[in-house]
């Protein structure tokens, strides 16, 4: 293969694989280094003592999509990726888990992000060598810009609205009680094949999701919502409820229609190791240390009816925040060594 052909392929890879959703203007103001994050909740002294992030009594805030990193970068917005295989494959390089010298890792990356190029040249060992070398160069040159922020969506079932508390109670089966680890599995239909190969075994050495391990546990038993928003939501669900047969109408049926959607916005900044999903399906996940940057709860899957939004970002320096987070993790590792917290 001529050098000009390799250059053309490298250009194609660069144009198609660059991080989606990050404009050149945004990249210019990217300060680099760790994310600015702050788990502290002003005015919640008791919660500061036990280190648990709780939302029940906090007032609604601006949407996460409007959160910025600090005054100097006031024009910059954070973008959180959906857990696609393309995002995951970029993240593996960004965190340093994937191995540049491993041809299988390079081939998996090509199949996920550049299937047509892979199919075109896989039949020739000589051409594939140059394709792999071009891909390695692209990764080295661009992995610092690969996205590390991701969103995790979890369905909630709501019960009654507490007017005094101005919040919906969450069905006990859906409540989140001091959870530090959250599993996130790709939404891609990997079982139907990735670039011509079927099933999870087609990319057996690449995890199909993440374990997001936060330094502090997260609790959510109530969903705050302004009364006017809660009333609108209840009225919408009541219209659906009134259409069912009278003999089927009961309080439990009312609750069946009251679904909400929790969105956690996180940034992964380091990995520990791979492990199997707790789902029992044998899916391999990459355990990561992550920062919870924001939380939103919506009354609809389309995210148009916002109940609650909270940012944990602050204006402290990246170096200070990063050092504090790493110290917390070192303490946790020693404290729980061999006891399963970081299993």
Image (cartoon, rainbow, N blue to C red):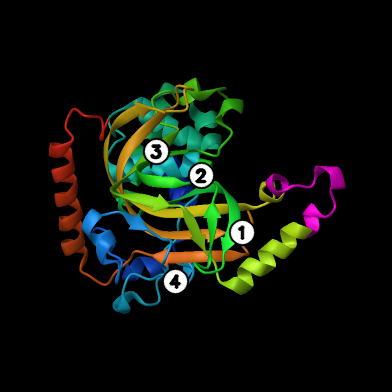
Count of marks, rendered view? 4
Q: Earlier in the sequence, mark 2 or mark 3?
A: 2
Is residue 328 placed above or below 31 in the rendered structure?
above
Give the residue displayed 47% in from the left and 72% down from the top.
62
* Residue located beneath label 3 in the image: 210
Residue, disc 4: 59
Of residues 213 and 186, the one nearer the viewer is: 213
Other residues around mark 2 within 10 Å, as few (<14) / some (14–19) / many (≥20): few
- Which residue is disc 2 drawn over? 172
Q: Secondary structure at mark 1?
A: loop
User: Chief secondary structure of the magenta span?
Assistant: helix
* Mark 2 and mark 3: Cα distance apart in space: 26 Å
| Left or right, 230 with reference to 99 | right
Residue 177 on the magenta span: no
Is residue 165 something one can see in this rendering?
A: yes
The CA span between labels 4 and 2 is 22 Å
Q: Earlier in the sequence, mark 1 or mark 3?
A: 3
Q: Secondary structure at mark 2?
A: helix
Q: Over which residues does the magenta segment extend? A: 239-253
Tag 1 or tag 4, which sits nearer the N-term?
4
């Amino acid at each position: 293969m001529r050098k000009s052909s390799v250059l053309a392929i490298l250009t194609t890879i660069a144009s198609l694989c660059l991080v989606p959703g990050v404009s050149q203007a945004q990249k210019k103001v990217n300060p680099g280094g760790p994310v600015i994050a702050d788990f502290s909740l002003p005015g919640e002294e008791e919660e500061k003592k036990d280190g648990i992030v709780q939302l029940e009594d906090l007032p609604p805030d601006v949407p996460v999509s409007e959160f910025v990193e600090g005054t100097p970068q006031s024009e910059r917005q954070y973008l959180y990726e959906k857990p696609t295989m393309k995002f995951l494959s970029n993240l593996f390089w960004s965190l340093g888990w994937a191995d540049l010298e491993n041809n299988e890792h390079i081939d998996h990356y090509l199949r996920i992000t550049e299937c047509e190029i892979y199919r075109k040249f896989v039949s020739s060992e000589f051409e594939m060598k140059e394709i792999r070398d071009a891909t390695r160069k692209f990764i080295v040159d661009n992995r610092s810009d690969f996205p590390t922020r991701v969103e995790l969506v979890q369905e909630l079932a709501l019960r009654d609205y507490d007017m005094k508390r101005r919040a919906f109670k969450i069905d006990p089966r859906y409540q989140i009680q001091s959870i530090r680890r959250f599993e996130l599995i790709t939404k891609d239909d990997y079982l139907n094949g990735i670039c011509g190969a079927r099933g999870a075994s087609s990319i057996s050495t690449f995890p199909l999701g993440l374990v997001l391990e936060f330094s502090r546990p997260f609790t959510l038993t109530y969903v705050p919502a302004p009364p006017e928003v809660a009333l609108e939501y209840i009225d919408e669900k009541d219209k659906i409820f009134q259409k069912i047969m009278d003999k089927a109408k009961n309080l439990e049926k009312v609750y069946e229609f009251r679904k909400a959607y929790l969105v956690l916005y996180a940034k992964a900044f380091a990995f520990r190791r791979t492990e199997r999903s707790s789902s029992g399906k044998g899916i391999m996940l990459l355990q990561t240390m992550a920062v919870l940057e924001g939380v939103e709860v919506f009354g609809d899957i389309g995210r148009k009816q916002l109940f609650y939004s909270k940012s944990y970002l602050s204006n402290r320096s990246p170096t200070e925040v990063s050092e504090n987070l790493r110290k917390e993790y070192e303490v946790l590792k020693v404290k729980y060594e061999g006891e399963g917290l970081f299993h």
